[in-house]
Image (spheres, grey):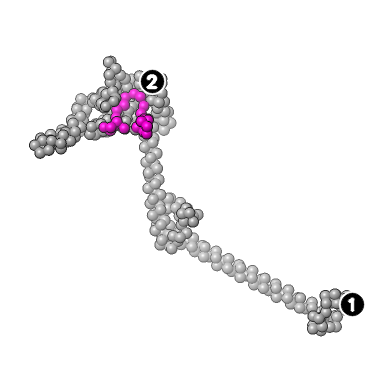
Amino acid sequence: MSATLREQATELRARVRRLETVSQDTAHREGFSLAAVERQISADETGQVFLSGEGAKGILIVGLHGLTESERSRFVGALGGLKARSNSALLALDGVRGEIRRNAAGTCWVVDLASPRRVPMFAWAAQTQGCGRSTKLGGPRLPTTNGGAHWCGLVSATMPITPEESPKACAYAQEGMACLAEHGCTPMQLEARRNAERAELCARQSAARVVVFLASKATGTTARMRGHWGDLTEFGERLMSLAMCGASQDAVVAHIRAEQAAAEEARIMAELVAEESAARARVAAEQAEAARIAAISATLRACGVTQSDWDLMTPKAQGLAQHRARLAGKM
């Protein structure tokens, strides 16, 4: 890494020299990039780096040789930020084992990454909220923007801070140890994992929506996807569940076609059942009408009257005629 960084530094120095004769402002801005690369070279070669920021005690980070190769590369790479952004390198030490202490004079913090008293450290990031409120914690901390609105820092279970001095920092250190024991990662890593899972779920949902929309458009069922208020209907939910399981557009189209065929078959069967029921009712009505006509004819014969005379009789007279026919044994 040092060889690559030295090549970058050489190119930047040459560029700054050329720009000094053209534009002092541009050369000044490029000087920040050169300073960042030189800070990376110094940290990689000496194994230590000093970070500082306005309104905060500086932080001396030593013992970079105690990191693994990947941890060291990640930390040194994060030191390449311009101005206060380089302080975000503290976030690269999240989950790394180290000792947090104050120097002998108490003027700065020391983070020793090779100390025999190393314990897991937990990084945090905060920003100033409305009315000047801030969520930053105690302990080693630095601004990550030039205006001081954003901060980051480190805490550990053994850092020299009491709960009275910074209850939130001590509580976060305990939360970090509990999270490490339960999930095997730090709170920031757990949050990043959950954010990645949510992002993956959103990406899967977006892809599923595209598949379902194209499938419904190909089968002419787009209108069935959403209800009156724009929510997914039961039909749309079924297609979304199918697409979320990894079904392709062709599979969703086949599912819709199968549902359409099943619905059409159910409709035909319902029509057949309705027609059969109507036919049975029609036959029963015809039989009932024939029985009624036969009963009327038998009554007319028993009473010895014609249909026209029967129609002219009152219900009482019809009853008396039927009574006389029954007494005569004709009914």
| Towards the viewer: 36 or 30 | 30
Task: Give the residue number, with chain letter if any, for mark 2.
Answer: 165
Q: Position of residue 62 (x, y in %)?
A: 26, 23
Tell me the amino acid under the disc marked 2.
Glu
Residues in magenta?
128-149
**Could you tell which of marks 2 and 1 lies nearer the N-terminus?**
2
Name the secondary structure under disc 2.
loop
Q: Which residue is mark 1?
A: 324
- Tag 1's secondary structure? helix
Image point (83%, 79%), residue name = 313
Indicate the position of residue 298 as horizontal and vertical percent values: 81, 79
Q: Horizontal placement of 234 versus 161: left or right?
A: right
Quadrant, the C terminus: bottom right
Image point (70%, 72%), residue name: 284
Give the percent coordinates (x, y) of residue 282.
Answer: 67, 73
Q: In the image, is 12 to the left or to the right of 290?
A: left
Nearer to me, 12 or 185: 12
Nearer to me, 66 or 132: 132
Residue name at image x 38 percent, y 51 percent: 207
The number of discs equals: 2
Compared to residue 316, the image places residue 177 above or below, namely above
Let me know if residue 133 is in the magenta part.
yes
Given residues 147 and 226, the one toward you in this image is 147
Up the image or down, 207 lies above or below 50; here it is below
